[in-house]
Amino acid sequence: MLTLRPLKENGQWGAKCRKAYDLDENGQRIPDGKGGWKNHREDTTDWNDKGNVEIWRAAWAAYTNRALESADRPERIDHRSYKRQGIDKIPSVHLGPAASQMEKRGIRTDKGEVNRQIAADNKLLKEIKARITRLYRWSKAETEKPQTQQSSLTALWEAQQQLNAPRTRTGKIRALQESAALFSFLQANGIQSMQRLHEKISDMNSHYYDLRGKIVKAERRIATLTERGEMWEQYNQYKSIHK
């Protein structure tokens, strides 16, 4: 948060806005019908211009990255949101100096808990996306094979199991569980061909992106409400001092 008031040459604060009169096509003031002139508020600086904020943030990112490069550091920053960068990830919330210091001392904060949950959700979403992507590519490749080269789902699965047969007891148990889960999934969705499996996975892929968007929106809403709750607590704590 920055001030919108300019500083005068004598070091005092100036006015943050001024009254500007509306003019007609001839450059004349326009009567307001009440004995005065139509006017509007005009900022004395351009510090509240959203376009300038974007320029300043980009300049800060460039300056910081030059400093990191000069220090031989691999880290880089980007002033754009994950969405604008095309990154499929839920953004974390800003901790602020107080919560950040508490977290460094091992004290868990509400904002810290939100960020930990966001990190866990990002990890889960990444795993889900990776699995769906692998299944999608595999099913697409099998579907595009000539009909004579296609095998039944059962035969394909059995061949894969034999190729990657686990040797340990734990691995065999996990393989049986995966087999049971797969056939349960195929039966529940009435899938009997690679074409139908590919269609189902494509639908799951689309549903994943729709669900991810809803999760991102919900996480940001939770973060906003958490921050407002903390601000309300601080207000109640210090309002008596202000009075």
Image (tube, rainbow, N blue to C red):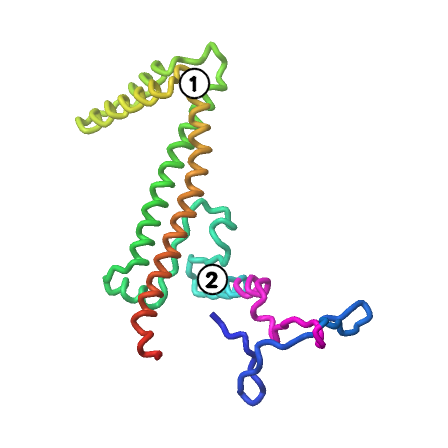
Q: Is residue 200 magenta?
A: no
**Tag 1, which secondary structure?**
helix
Please state which of residues 19 and 144 is positioned toward the viewer in this rendering: 19
N-term mark: 1 or 2: 2
Please identify the quadrant where the C terminus is shown.
bottom left
Q: Which residue is mark 1?
A: 194
**Relative to residue 3, is residue 89 depicted above or below?**
above
Q: Furthest residue to the left? A: 169
Residue 19 point in image, percent of width and height: 65, 76
| Residue at screen point 51% across, 75% down | 3
Q: Is residue 54 magenta?
A: yes
Residue 224 point in image, percent of width and height: 39, 57
Residue type at numbered disc 2:
Glu
Extent of the magenta region: 34-57
| Residue at screen point 31% across, 66% down | 233
Residue 40 point in image, percent of width and height: 65, 71
**Relative to residue 196, is residue 210 depicted above or below?**
below
